[in-house]
Structures are given as structure tokens and as C-alpha cells.
Image: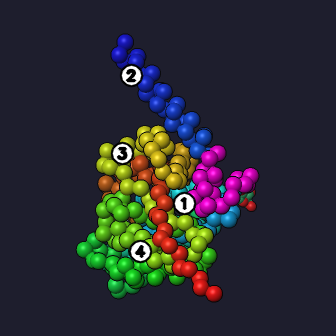
Amino acid sequence: MTLYMALIIILSYLALIKCIFFRHRRTLVKSLKRALNAPPSRETNGENIRALVVTAHPDDECMFFAPTIIRLVELNATVHLLCLSEGNYYNQGAQRKQELLNSCAVLGIPASRIIIVNHKKLPDDPKAEWSVSLVSSEILKHIRAHSINMVLTFDGSGVSSHANHIAIYNAVRHLASTGEVPNDCTLLSLVTVGLLRKYISFLDVPLSWFLPSCVCCIIGSKAYKQAKAAMLCHRTQLLWFRYLYITFSRYMFVNTFQTIAQGPKNLKIY
Ligand SMILES: *[C@@H]1O[C@H](CO)[C@@H](O)[C@H](O)[C@H]1NC(C)=O
Ligand SMILES: [Zn+2]
């Protein structure tokens, strides 16, 4: 009898995930437009979204942002990637750069929209303190160069607490507070979830969906294969625990974002 009950509960939970998945496909564009403060319209694509994903290392894009990148590309949004280091911690910079290009090709970001920064002061190193002013000026340069209207990056916990991830969040928050960000540009931070939720794979979908967030991107099994293929491009990183990550990480299936509040804009004085 209890076994029977357990089976019913499990099947209902899986059915709930399926329902959320279909509902999400209809509401994603709406939530993106709301995040952009764009007037609601009947269009169902994201052609006027010009997104900039800002990461610290080659492989961050597929480890943490794959569901979002895949969904944005699918909606025909323009997606740029700014990776602030070559991932040179083990002196594999050149190789990792190529792996990043391959991974992005799988996710749907063309090489012409990828910028990999190689700066002495921005080393791939959790002990290095990245300068807020240097990182924020790099980001601002790219926001301006490509008329970006949506920046997506880490939050204050950086998913894995890596200091380089957190440094990017601090830089974006700095930009937000100074009012240098163009008026039409929304800043979004990827929500870090606790350890328990982090490794329950797609079972986290209902929690991600029902807990309040500004944007929630979910992918199904077909897109998951794409995310997995992108992960496998990072051959230098494929240690045994990376395979566990691919199977169990919730970030392979779902991303949630919060808006980073922006301070007063520079007043134009005529
Ligand atoms: C994206 O663009 C392609 C090619 O122009 C088109 O076939 C497809 O329907 C578009 N997707 C959306 C969601 O508008
Ligand atoms: Zn990283």
C-alpha cells in the first residue's frame, strides 16, 4: 500500500514537471519582455533582445548558463558572450579558448559574438582579486559596442563561490549603482541555490518555477543533450566529477534570475 502511494506521488511529481515545462514555453518570452520593461506585444520571439552573458572562465557558459543560452538562441535573440579570462590556471589557455569556441558553436553562439579577455590583471585564479573598475569598464565597453539590452551574469554567491564569479557580480552591481548603464539595459543575476537543490537535476524544476524569480529558463531532454554536448567540448576539464555534474546539476536543466536594481540615472542637464 505504501509502495503504491509512493508511486502515485512520484508520477504526480513528474507530471507536474511536464506541465511546468509546457507552460514555461508559452510564458518565457513574456517574462523576458517584462524584464526588459518592453511593452507587452503579441510577438512570440525574442528578436529585439540583445543579450550579453558575462562569465569568468571557459566552461562557465555551459556549466551554469546553458538553459538560458539555448532558450535565447531558440527565440532568435542576439546572444553575445564575454568571457573575462582564458582559463589559464593550469597553463592551458590556448586550448581552453578553442574549447570555448566549440562549446559556443554547439550552444548557438557564433565566434563573431564571443569575446575572450586575456588580461594580466584578470587571471583565472580564485585567490586573485579582480578589480571592480577594470571588470566594470570591460563590461560597459561591450554593452555600448553591441547596444546590449540584457546583461546576464552571476549573483553574489557565484553559484560555486568562485571569487572570479563574484567579482563579476560586484562589478555589475557597481555599474548599476553609478547609473552608467544605458537606460534600456536590464541586469540579471543567476540565482545560486543551496547544495541540496543544486544536485537534484531536473527534480528542482518545480522549486525553481514556483519560487519567485524574474526570469526562469527551463530546458527539456532534447536541449539537455545539446547542453551536454557543449560540456563535452571542454575536454581539458572532463575529470570524473565533471560527468557527475552533467548528470546531477540543476544548472544543466534550469536557470533562474533576479534583477539587479539600478541606481539613479545620470541626469541630463540641458
Ligand atoms: C527564428 O528565425 C528562424 C529563421 O528566420 C525562423 O524560422 C523561426 O521561426 C524563428 N523563431 C522564432 C521563435 O521566432
Ligand atoms: Zn568559472
Which badge, 2 or 1, comes first in the chain's sequence?
2
| Secondary structure category for the residue under label 1 | helix
**Quarter of the rendering containing residue 6:** top left
Q: Nearer the viewer, residue 121 or 228?
A: 121
| Secondary structure category for the residue under label 4 | helix
Position of residue 4 measured from the top left corner of the image (x, y, whole percent): 40, 16
* Mark 2 lies on residue: 6
Crowd rating for badge 3 (residues with CA inside 10 Å; few <14, some 14–19, many 20+): some
Position of residue 248 measured from the top left corner of the image (x, y, whole percent): 38, 46
Which badge, 4 or 1, comes first in the chain's sequence?
1
**Badge 2 amino acid:** Ala
* Mark 1 lies on residue: 69
| Secondary structure category for the residue under label 2 | helix
Magenta region, residue range: 26-44
Crowd rating for badge 1 (residues with CA inside 10 Å; few <14, some 14–19, many 20+): many
Q: Are marks 2 and 1 in contact (CB under 8 Å)?
A: no
**Badge 1 amino acid:** Ile
Rounded to the nearest whole Å, what is the CA distance between mark 2 and mark 1?
A: 36 Å
Q: Is-magenta flag for residue 78?
A: no
Which badge, 4 or 2, comes first in the chain's sequence?
2
Rounded to the nearest whole Å, what is the CA distance between mark 1 and mark 3?
A: 21 Å
Q: Is residue 62 visible?
A: no
**Badge 4 amino acid:** His
Q: Is-magenta flag for residue 32?
A: yes
Q: Nearer the viewer, mark 4 or mark 2?
A: 4
Rounded to the nearest whole Å, what is the CA distance between mark 4 and mark 1?
A: 25 Å
Q: Quadrant of the N terminus?
A: top left
Position of residue 225 measured from the top left corner of the image (x, y, whole percent): 52, 50
* Mark 3 lies on residue: 197
